[in-house]
């Protein structure tokens, strides 16, 4: 440690004196807690007090939770928070921690709070020391216990720990905590049962070997202590082994070998009705004082409230989980020309339910829609909104709307729902024959593309506002980004829970994801599993949805292929999409040298149909089989009026469309159809390396 750091961590002049300080200094370490970054740097001596090696500590205070029991952590957090809020300059506290072997150690910490010019705390410098020898003196221990009794009661400490319990198992874990909970009452073990349909379900059965066969479920009219307290709504205090044996002769022969000398059974009552019963078993106690009885009754009331909250939470979780599973696709359809893998991971390892979803939508013409989205919130309502959004997105896409229109309509739908939730979403329409991907992003994270060689890159996509918000603010324009997915490339869609890292920004999370995808398994199913495992490993607290789509090489367009798309009037996105389709098809079918001519001629035919007819146009591009390889563009409309080529004159601004088609194409024509007509043009497309010949038969150089 250099002089500057040593000076920063030296004891202040107003550090309180202590008679045993000289001894404690031999077992004392220092810490420097940066409140802005949340990092707490500890020297080797401080780590030794916590029985931690340097490689076990990552400078994050939460890592110390492995050594500090939950109830002590709650008390210390409250003490530091109060000092910061009250404007204090220092604080001190004794607390218990656990050594590596599980034995307790008394410890003392003293911190000095540094504030900036505005009084805002930004740093805490202090020490932590082993106080075991100091507190071994009975007088010092009595003073400490007296101070703790003045500060908080046992009921308050237990209630504070129970406030963090979210499930029934959490409640029982708090009560069984060997360094807190009911250990403060001297109870050797805990038994607890919950009332379900007129029967008591045993959820905590005391010490090892205490389970009595046939008592997992018991009726309230059976001669057992928990049945009695549920039936009478009054506590039952058993003051001796003889009292237990005489009162419950059926139960005692099964548990008499456990050395129980006393027991207290409490009804758990919430909202004036019993929800279960709690039993505390003692191995070195004889009788209960009036204060102990009052304390246990008060504690039972607090436990009952926590249990009811946990039971309601579990019921809501089960309902939300069932609702969410029902709303997500039961199966992903087989997609010709692609491999698909999807995953959903609930928040906090299954303890929360959110609004993340994925979907694969088969579309006409060899296309497929891929959707990933996230509704705000983690509850039943979020799951319900998610299900409705998934359905309407699927419906709008299946109706043939462009990706931008699909997103805009979904936003209006969400805005008109009776909800204050919004949603982020990405929608990709993939033409697996050409590899053309049209991407729309509504406030969602950017997708990734994994190359065939395994490398991965972020795919920046221009986006609009989240669904619901864009409708509320009248900003329904969603730009469409068009990219190409080559055979063997994989598009990675995901929700933000996959890139959220505690204490880090989004860019760091994105880079970590890129590294995971790059170094992950090549096959999609193992890769999807690996991405979810990585979230579990770092303790991610948000739910995650993942959709991986890989274009197969075998589905690349071949000679003789055919692509078709409808272009509605007043739909510029559809017109742009048709142009991208034509460009991609021409390149995929080996006619890149004529791409500009074909695209310009097709654009003229489409524009004529949209300007001079009603009902839009259907554009088809295909390769004709025959002795000469030709590429043909058909544009169908509903008008029976046949077009004619005319001279636009020197000053004309229109009339040159068919003239351009005539000049660009090798041959063109018009065919009458029963519901309209088809204007077409053909282009000679030689095999690669062969000279192109004009329609007259001469070589074109």
Image: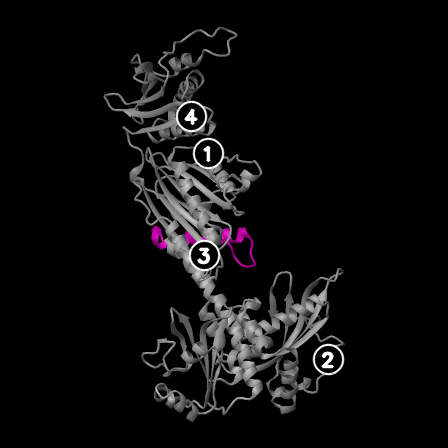
Residue 456: where, in percent of width, then height?
43, 47
User: Element at badge 3?
Assistant: loop
Q: Earlier in the sequence, mark 1 or mark 4?
A: 1
User: For this rendering, which residue is in front, 585 or 653?
Assistant: 653
**Tag 2 residue:** 16
Mark whose residue sits in front, 4 or 2: 4
User: For this rendering, which residue is in front, 61 or 194?
Assistant: 194
**Tag 4 residue:** 568
**Tag 1 residue:** 405
Q: Earlier in the sequence, mark 2 or mark 1?
A: 2
Coloration mode: one colour
The number of numbered badges drawn on the structure is 4
Q: CA distance from mark 4 to mark 2?
A: 82 Å
Residue 353 — which label? Answer: 3
Q: CA distance from mark 3 to mark 1?
A: 30 Å
Decide: few, some or many residues near mark 1? Use Cα within 10 Å; few <14, some 14-19, many ≥20. many
- Residue at image point 46% right, 30% down: 573
């Amino acid at each position: 440690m250099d002089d500057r750091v040593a000076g920063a961590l030296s004891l202040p002049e107003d550090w309180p004196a202590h008679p045993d300080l000289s001894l404690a200094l031999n077992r004392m370490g220092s810490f420097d807690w940066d409140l802005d970054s949340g990092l707490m740097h500890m020297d080797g001596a401080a780590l030794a007090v916590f029985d931690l090696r340097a490689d076990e500590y990552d400078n994050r205070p939460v890592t110390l939770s492995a050594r500090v029991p939950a109830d002590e952590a709650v008390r210390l957090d409250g003490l530091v928070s109060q000092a910061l809020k009250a404007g204090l300059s220092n604080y001190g506290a004794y607390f218990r921690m656990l050594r590596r072997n599980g034995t307790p150690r008394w410890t003392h910490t003293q911190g000095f709070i540094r504030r900036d010019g505005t009084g805002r705390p930004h740093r805490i410098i202090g020490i932590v020391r082993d106080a075991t020898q100091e507190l071994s003196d009975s007088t010092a221990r009595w003073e400490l216990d007296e101070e703790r009794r003045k500060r908080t009661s046992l009921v308050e400490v237990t209630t504070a720990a129970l406030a963090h319990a979210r499930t029934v198992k959490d409640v029982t874990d708090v009560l069984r905590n060997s360094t807190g909970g009911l250990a403060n009452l001297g109870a050797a073990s805990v038994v607890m049962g919950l009332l379900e349909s007129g029967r008591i379900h045993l959820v905590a059965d005391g010490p090892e070997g205490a389970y009595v066969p046939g008592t997992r479920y018991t009726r309230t009219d059976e001669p057992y202590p928990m049945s009695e307290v549920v039936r009478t709504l009054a506590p039952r205090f058993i003051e001796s082994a003889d009292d237990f044996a005489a009162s419950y002769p059926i139960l005692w022969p099964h548990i008499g070998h456990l050395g129980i000398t006393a027991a207290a059974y409490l009804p758990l009552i919430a909202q004036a009705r019993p929800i279960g019963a709690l039993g505390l078993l003692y191995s070195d106690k004889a009788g209960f004082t009036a204060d102990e009885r009052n304390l246990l009754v008060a504690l039972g009331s607090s436990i009952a409230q926590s249990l009811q909250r946990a039971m309601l939470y579990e019921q809501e979780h089960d309902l939300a989980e069932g609702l969410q599973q029902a709303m997500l696709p039961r199966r992903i359809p087989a997609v010709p020309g692609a491999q698909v893998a999807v995953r959903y991971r609930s928040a906090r390892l299954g303890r929360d339910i959110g609004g993340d979803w994925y979907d694969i939508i088969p579309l006409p013409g060899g296309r497929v829609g891929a959707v990933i989205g996230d509704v705000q919130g983690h509850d039943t309502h979020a799951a319900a909104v998610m299900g409705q959004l998934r359905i309407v997105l699927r419906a709008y896409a299946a109706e043939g709307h462009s990706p931008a229109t699909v997103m805009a309509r979904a936003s209006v739908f969400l805005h008109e729902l009776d909800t204050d939730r919004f949603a982020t979403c990405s929608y990709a329409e993939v033409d697996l024959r050409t590899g053309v991907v049209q991407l729309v992003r509504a406030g969602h994270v950017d997708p990734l593309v994994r190359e065939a060689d395994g490398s991965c890159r972020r795919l920046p996509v221009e986006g609009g506002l989240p669904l619901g918000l864009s409708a509320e603010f009248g900003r329904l324009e969603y730009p469409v980004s068009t990219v190409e997915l080559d055979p063997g490339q994989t598009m990675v869609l995901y929700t933000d829970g996959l890139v959220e890292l505690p204490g880090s920004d989004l860019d760091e999370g994105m880079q970590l994801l890129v590294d995971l995808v790059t170094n992950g398994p090549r096959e999609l199913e193992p890769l999807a599993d690996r991405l979810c495992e990585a979230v579990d490993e770092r303790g991610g607290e948000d739910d995650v949805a993942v959709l991986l789509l890989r274009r197969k090489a075998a589905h690349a367009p071949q000679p003789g292929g055919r692509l078709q798309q409808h272009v509605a009037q007043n739909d510029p996105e559809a017109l742009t999409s048709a142009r991208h389709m034509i460009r991609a098809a021409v390149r995929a079918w080996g006619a890149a040298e004529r791409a500009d001519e074909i695209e310009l001629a097709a654009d003229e035919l489409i524009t004529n149909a949209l300007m001079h007819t009603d009902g839009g146009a259907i554009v088809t591009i295909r390769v004709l089989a025959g002795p000469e390889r030709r590429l043909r563009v058909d544009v169908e409309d509903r008008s029976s009026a046949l077009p004619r080529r005319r001279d636009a004159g020197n000053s004309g601004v229109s009339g040159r469309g068919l003239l351009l088609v005539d000049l660009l194409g090798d041959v063109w024509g018009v065919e009458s159809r029963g519901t309209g007509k088809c204007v077409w043009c053909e282009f000679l497309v030689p095999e690669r390396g062969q000279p192109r010949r004009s329609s007259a038969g001469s070589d074109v150089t």
